[in-house]
Amino acid sequence: SAGRIVVIGGGFGGAACARALKRADAKLQVTLIEPNKIFTSCPFSNEVIAGLREMETQHFGYDKLAADGIAVIGQAAAKIEPQQRSVTTTDGTVLTYDRLVLSPGIDFHGEALPGYDDAASEKMPHAWRAGAQTLLLRRQLEAMADGGTVVIAIPANPSRCPPAPYERASLIAHYLKTKKPRSKVLILDAKDNFSQQRLFEKAWKELYGDMIERIGLSQGGRVTSVDPATMTIVTEFGNYTPDVANVIPPQRAGRIAEIAGAADATGWCPIDPMSFESKRVRNVHVIGDACLGGGIPKSASAASAQGKACAAAIVALLAGRTPEPPRLTGVCYNTVAPDYGFSLAGNYQPKGDIFAEVEGGATSPVDAPRELRAREAAEAERWFQTITTDTFG
Ligand code: FAD
């Protein structure tokens, strides 16, 4: 009976894919494996860190997916045997599939940042997976004295949501300006250039004066190791001992992708962009942050679009048809103050082994009246409402 599809990971990619599969063909047996009963959204978690939102607004459950007829299994996937086409969950349940979809998000590259491990993240939170880490960073900011320094360490690309570290720097500056105006935000960056840089830098000057300082790759900004015991951050040019250290380590695909054999030496998963099928493991599809998407940034909006396109491709493949080339749209909003936002929208199509950006994209103008910035901040909230309702509601 062809038509058993197992989806691993109930985040923006996996949940969107599971729903799209069931909607396309109610006869498909769709199973979603996700250990958390409640999903915690990274989008808008920077607002939680800055005290502008409460954590409850980030929480989403799986009741609606279950009501759609998706079998939701509250376990983690522990083992995958592509030959048998089976998945084993942590409690030993074995599920077989015709097609498997992986959307496990990210994990951290232990070896890539010496000194940084799970224990270090309790002192130097990454807050790059939302939840307890988000609240820890918020509490550390609340506990910091006025005049303190917050360091944000940013890795090179590819990584989850390239503009989000700069949005975070902005919103932390907003919090500090309001509550602890003598404090500083120091960005230590493993990149020289970053997404929407001119828009961010203009906003920083306008809103926060010289509160935010950034040291890029060429100035020695790349963090090479950390020592949580002494709260030391080591870069190519010197050491820093900030009051609050938000260390975002280098990333790779969620660990289960490696267990499946779908990840390559980069730590990410190469795919055929026509179908999202893994280049390394047959009948396994990889979507969201975990896949090597090329020009398409790792975002919730991209993961959701990929989830839907992957569902359409699987339906076609199960029927013996060739999938239609997907055309993906992603939009990314950045909020740098409660009434100040801007955006970047892009369209992407398969080109060889990756997705390439095609025409039709748009970015907010660098010189724009404050009303437009306020309107885009409001649009960002509507985007969040729409995508979370579409995915979980
Ligand atoms: P996730 O949404 O992380 O979902 C992965 C799921 O897989 C998780 O629920 C996890 O529990 C589950 N999982 C992992 N391993 C297993 C396993 N072995 N078995 C079962 N389940 C497993 N994107 C935007 O578009 N707009 C934004 O404004 C935005 N802001 C952001 C702000 C911050 C601070 C950060 C960090 C990210 C932001 N993003 C934003 C990016 C967005 O969060 C990710 O790109 C998106 O969540 C990727 O979706 P995904 O499905 O790949 O992974």
Image (tube, grey):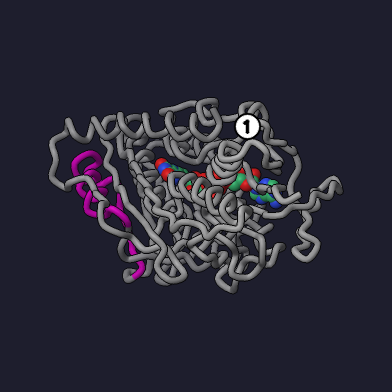
* Disc 1: residue Cβ within 8 A of ligand 1's nearest atom: no
* Residue pictured at 56% horizontal, 48% vertical: 311
Decide if residue 53 is on the left or right side of residue 17.
Answer: left
Callout 1: helix, strand or loop? helix
Q: Position of residue 105 (x, y in %)?
A: 57, 51
Report whether residue 122 is seen. Answer: no
Task: Tally the marks.
Answer: 1
Q: Which residue is mark 1?
A: 65
Decide if residue 340 is on the left or right side of residue 249.
Answer: left
Q: Quadrant of the C terminus?
A: top right
Q: Please, what is the three-letter code of the amino acid marked with disc 1? A: Leu
Q: Alpha-carbon neighbours of circle 1 within 10 Å: few (<14), some, or many (≥20)?
A: many
Q: Residue furthest right?
A: 92
Of the pair 180 and 36, the residue shown nearer to us:
36
Q: Position of residue 56 (x, y in %)?
A: 54, 25
Q: Position of residue 26 (x, y in %)?
A: 64, 36
Q: Position of residue 328 (x, y in %)?
A: 40, 51
Report whether residue 47 is seen. Answer: yes
Asked whether residue 208 is drawn in magenta, I would say: yes
* Residue pictured at 37% horizontal, 69% vertical: 220
Q: Quadrant of residue 181?
A: top left
Of the pair 346 and 5, the residue shown nearer to us:
5
Asked whether residue 98 is drawn in magenta, I would say: no
Q: Is residue 120 above or below residue 367?
A: below
* Residue pictured at 33% horizontal, 53% vertical: 347
Q: Residue furthest front?
A: 320
Decide if residue 349 is on the left or right side of residue 131.
Answer: left
* Residue pictured at 44% horizontal, 49% vertical: 302
Residue bounds of the magenta highlight:
195-217
Of the pair 10 and 171, the residue shown nearer to us:
10
